[in-house]
Every structure is written in structure tokens, then in C-alpha cells.
Amino acid sequence: MKARIQKVLKYSLFFLVALFITINLFIVLSGRFYMYKGIAHTYLIGKTGPTIYDLDVSPYATIHSADVPSKSIKNEAFNQFELPEKYRDLIADLETKAFLVLKNDTLIYEKYWGGHTAETVSNSFSVVKTLVAILIGVAIEDGDIKSIDDPVSLYLPEFINKEKEQLTIRHLLEMASGLDWEESAKNPFSDNAESYYGSELRRLVLGQSMKSTPGKVFKYQSGNSQLLGYILESATGVDLSEYAEDKVWRKMGAEHDAYWSLDKTLGDEKAFCCMYATARDYAKLGKLILNKGRLNDEQIIPSWYFSEMVTPQQLTTREGIPNYRYGLHTWTYLDPEGKVNYCRGVNGQYVITIPSENIVIVRLGSKKKSLVTIPKNKLHDADYIEKVKFKVGHSSGLFEYISLGKLISSER
């Protein structure tokens, strides 16, 4: 028995050594050195991927809070709402860290779990894509960018060639660039993984080739957002974090500093993700969206541009149905009870606005529910598609957060 155990241990050790050598050879020969950092910050410490608390994984730039922060106004029934059991289960099962509800610019509910507090900053992931879109609109209004339909090559000379010259800023904003970016939150070999853990972000995104004609099909790609970040820096001559601080963050009355991850020390902001902020300041971003880009008697987002942001663009989706879900780097849910405009991140980060009811909902957490899709056997079922067309591409969790926010609002 002892000899058998020793034999098993021996072969297990050989297997682990062989696996270690194979992985290292692959990384070295493929040039994917970013994987060392990824492995060190995930598998070696018991994680399976990026988390909302990854601030110290990469260098970062600071986005300073307002000199005179806008304090949240609480109503007299603040936090008196008791969560029904089904929502307590939802909160627990998806490892929710924060849930805030504002009604008529007043904070009516604010709860935190798992050690998260009102002062905790956490990763927005793709919520920040909407902020990047807002900055594009500001730059156009300021005259730094001429038009939303400008060719990308006007700002990034790497795109001056026959293949890429048809690509415009609008194509990037509507996620219809036709570029060859591989979008995946789980594949360690994807462009997303390299952009998150790598140190040569500019080389990665400027080296993309055209895969299909832009402006035709909605295909969500984080590389589009990163290109928008580089366009902003080229057009304004200002670092992305500094521009965000000056044009939006401080004007919102942010209560806390925010932090934007860089690909390396003194490097480039990860415009596709990775701004860290508090739940209350995410709520202020929600108020800006809810109020159609206007705060404190100032139109921060140009009115014409805001209208474009929250209007689903005329594209086809991968399911073969019209795009009802996405404007310009902003998600739209055409709820029959009232349209919803929102931002979302990969682990279920949400900044949700419901204009018809003047509600802002912020949900932060570590897990999410699956997206609504059309089953293969229903792709040609016109009646079925008609029933679900407005929900396809949205997480089922979104609808539950909307329902909970409305319930809290109705009982304030």
C-alpha cells in the first residue's frame, strides 16, 4: 500500500513538473508574458479571474474629488425598507456588495455587505465605458473633436491605410467596428486578458486589423473603448484620467477620489474598464445620465449627443435581430413600463436609470446572472422572438434589480 502511494505521488510530481514546464514554454514561445501576472493574481491566490477589488494589481492614476462635494440628501424614510426573502436570497447568492436607490435626487436606500462600505472603492469594469463615451461628447462640444463621424485615422495615424480608413468614431461608440478583437471574460488567451494584465496596451489595440465592414453588426468589443481613450488623448492633449476629472468627475460633485488602472507605471489608462470608485459616486454618474447630462444648471453632456447615446443604433445583432439594446457605449432596455438606460460591468456592476420614475439604482457585486439569449431552436420562431426581443442581451439580474428598486421607491 505504501509503495502504491509513493508511486502515485511520484507520477503526480512528474505530471506537475511537466505541466509547469509546458506552461512556461508556451508563455515564452508565444510572447504572452502577461499570463505570469494574471496567474499570480488569480490562480495562485485562489481566484479564478479579475475581481472588483483589484486596485493594487496594476499602477493607477488618481481622479480627484470635488473641492465642494455634493453630499447625498437622504429622505426621512431612509433605509427603513425591509428586503423580502426572495431579494435577500438574490443579494446573498450573487455576492452583492452595495445596493443604492435614489428617487428624485434623494437617497432612499443604501446598504452594504461583506465588508464593503460607503468609503470602499471598487472596480467598475465596463461601467466606465459610458464615461468614456460622455467624454467624447464633451470633446466634440469643446471643438477638440470635429464630429462623431470623423474617421479614426484623423486622430490615430496607425489607422491611415486602405483597410482601416472607413472606421469612424461612431463605429467605435456603437460597438460595430468590425475589428478583430477577441472579447472574453474567461479565456486567458483573449485580448481582454492581455489588455487587463499586460503592459503594452497601445501596441495591442493599435495593431488590430479589420475583420468585417464597420457600421453593420453590433459586436461588443473592449478594444473599441480603448481606441476611444486614445482618440481623446490625441484630440485634447490631456491624459484620460485628468480629462475625466476636469470635465465630469469634479463637476458631478464626487465625494471621493477615484482611481483608473494603467497598463504600467506612467502608462495608459485602461479605457475599457478598471476605474475604481465608491457606490455613492457611481450614483452621481447615474444622476448625470438620469438628468440627460445636466447637473447644477450646467449641461455637462451636450443635449444632442446625450440623445444619441441613449438611442439604440440601427444595427443587426449576432442573433440576427435588430439592435434594441445598445446606444453609444450605453445600454438601453426598452421596458414597456418605461425605457431604462444603464451602464454595466462584467461581474454585475450596474448604474441603472429609469427616467419615467426618476430613479437611479446602483448595484455592485461579485457575481451576475446569465444574459437572455435566443435558443437555437427558436432562431426562426417569429412569435417567440417578438416576445423576447427587448430582453435579449440583458442579464436576467437586471430585471430583478429594476423590480427591487421600484419596490423600494414605492414604499419610501
Image (spheres, rainbow, N blue to C red):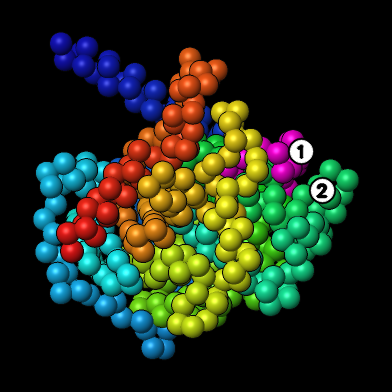
Residue 210 belongs to magenta span: yes
Q: In which quadrant of the rendered view does residue 31 lie?
A: top right
- Upstream in the sequence, badge 2 or badge 1? 2
Q: Position of residue 241 (x, y in %)?
A: 54, 72
The residues bearing labels 2 and 1 have C-alpha atoms spaced at a distance of 9 Å
Query: Contact, CB < 8 Å: mark 2 with mark 1?
Result: yes
Q: Is residue 148 left or right of residue 344?
A: right
Give the SS element for disc 1. loop
**Within 10 Å of the Cα at label 2, are there few (<14), some (14-19), or many (20+) other Cα atoms?**
some
In the displayed structure, 133 sits above or below 294; it is above
Residue at which label 1 appears:
213
In the displayed structure, 146 sits above or below 396; it is below
State the residue at coordinates (73%, 48%).
Answer: 207
Which part of the image, by quadrant, shows the C terminus?
bottom left
State the residue at coordinates (34%, 43%).
Answer: 399
State the residue at coordinates (74%, 36%).
Answer: 212
Q: Position of residue 298 (x, y in %)?
A: 52, 81
Q: Count of labels shown?
A: 2
Q: Which residues are magenta?
A: 207-225
- For badge 2, the amino acid type reads Gln
Looking at the picture, tell me which residue is in the foreground, 402 or 111.
402
Which part of the image, by quadrant, shows the N terminus?
top left
Q: Position of residue 78 (x, y in %)?
A: 17, 69
**Residue 166 shows which numbered tag?**
2
Q: Is residue 160 left or right of residue 134?
A: right
**Within 10 Å of the Cα at label 1, are there few (<14), some (14-19), or many (20+) other Cα atoms?**
some
Give the SS element for disc 2. loop
